[in-house]
Amino acid sequence: MPANNQRLKGLFVPNVVPHDAQGEINEAELRRYVYWLIDKGVHGLYPNGSTGEFTRLTEGERRRVIEIVADQTNGRVPILAGAAEANTRETIRACEYYHELGCRAVAIVSPFYYKLTPAGVYAYFKEIADNSPIDVTLYNIPMFASPIDVPTVQRLAEECPRVVAIKDSSGDLPHMMRMISAVRPLRPDFSFLTGWDVALMPMLLIGCDGGTNACTGIVPEIMRKLYDMTLAGNIDAARDLQYRILPLFDAMLFSAEFPEGFRAALRLRGLNVGVGRQPKSPVQQEQLERLTEQLQCLLAAEGFVNEPLCGCPVDDIGDSQDITRIVRGVIQELKKHGLAT
């Protein structure tokens, strides 16, 4: 049976792991970051996710990250702990340890490197779910790992009470709708979380329960307001916030090696996160410096930092009438399918 009846919902932060000058985990700064995020109103934390570069940490470091986050959180918000290891045996051991630390659930990415068939993906998660003492969230990120298709999600939801949610980072709105349609009638307690920041509002409108969004770790104030306004039905204000997130997300994601853009933005917000472990060429370092100026302008426009000394360009973010037309069209389609009122 599930370990906790509390439904997974809200915004869980896939946090960056701060490093010190030697490239080791900066525990003091990680604790300060956790305190800052909770103070800004996030609903939960998601350490050892993609933004936390879990594949670049040792097994011991991954465990240490969860230890620090759990201790600093002290039960104030739930923790969705990334528990993916190289095989089911090690993953189950991680599940056991994170259960002992008091985490609400674990998130486990679909098998990566070796691309598996749907039957292989099912068998992988089934073995983990049958042996885990803690609730399991499936993690679908098809650009990096074996995709989790709708029939597999439905089968796991039906057969495995421990599987309580899916985090989907495909950004595919119809795919999410198909999962919700297939699973929710069978498991009303099952949660659907989106990992695609620029689709948070439409994903919430079609029935998602929340998100695991990297932007929440950078601008938690905006993301929390976006979440609250969407659920309150304040569509015009929520739409404005979603479009304000778009240029920031695109800059952080596409202008540098992931997740260096998010690390650069956090430095601008006053967190001493250090540098990532992936080496950078001189060209990449120059690109990151240019990106930092761009991010400073985007954050300055939101009032979080000062503009750079050289100033910021004035950008045209698009015709608001076009934006309104697109959003209204999406809502009309949702109404046709009975997914909006």
Image: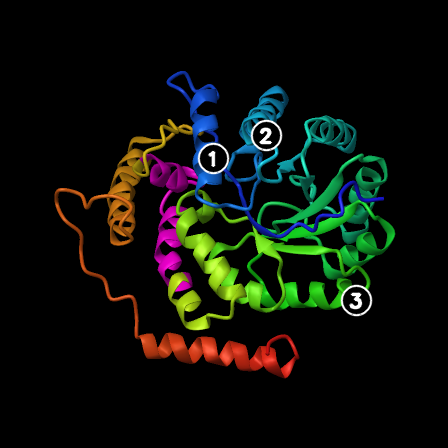
Q: CA distance from mark 2 to mark 1?
A: 19 Å
Q: CA distance from mark 2 to mark 3?
A: 35 Å
Query: Circles 3 and 1: CB distance less than 8 Å?
Result: no
Disc with the residue nearer the chain's start (2 vs 3): 2
Q: Answer whether residue 255 is magenta in the image.
A: yes
Q: Is residue 334 visible?
A: yes
Q: Quadrant of residue 103?
A: top right
Residue 10: percent from left, percent from top: 57, 52
- Specify the segment rendered in magenta: 242-267
Q: CA distance from mark 3 to mark 1?
A: 36 Å
Residue 144: percent from left, percent from top: 59, 45
Q: Which residue is mark 3?
A: 185
- Given this view, does label 2 or label 1 mark the residue nearer the observer? 2
Q: Residue at the location (39% across, 57% down)?
A: 245
- Looking at the rendered structure, the kind of residue marked 1 is Val
| Frontmost residue, 212 versus 55 | 212
- Mark 3 lies on a secondary structure that is loop
Q: Is residue 293 left or right of residue 325?
A: left
Q: Residue at the location (50% across, 65% down)?
A: 230
Q: Residue at the location (36% across, 28% down)?
A: 272
- Looking at the rendered structure, the kind of residue marked 3 is Pro
Whether 287 is drawn above or below 303: the answer is above
Whether 223 is drawn above or below 80: the answer is below
Q: How is the image coloured?
A: rainbow
Disc with the residue nearer the chain's start (2 vs 1): 1
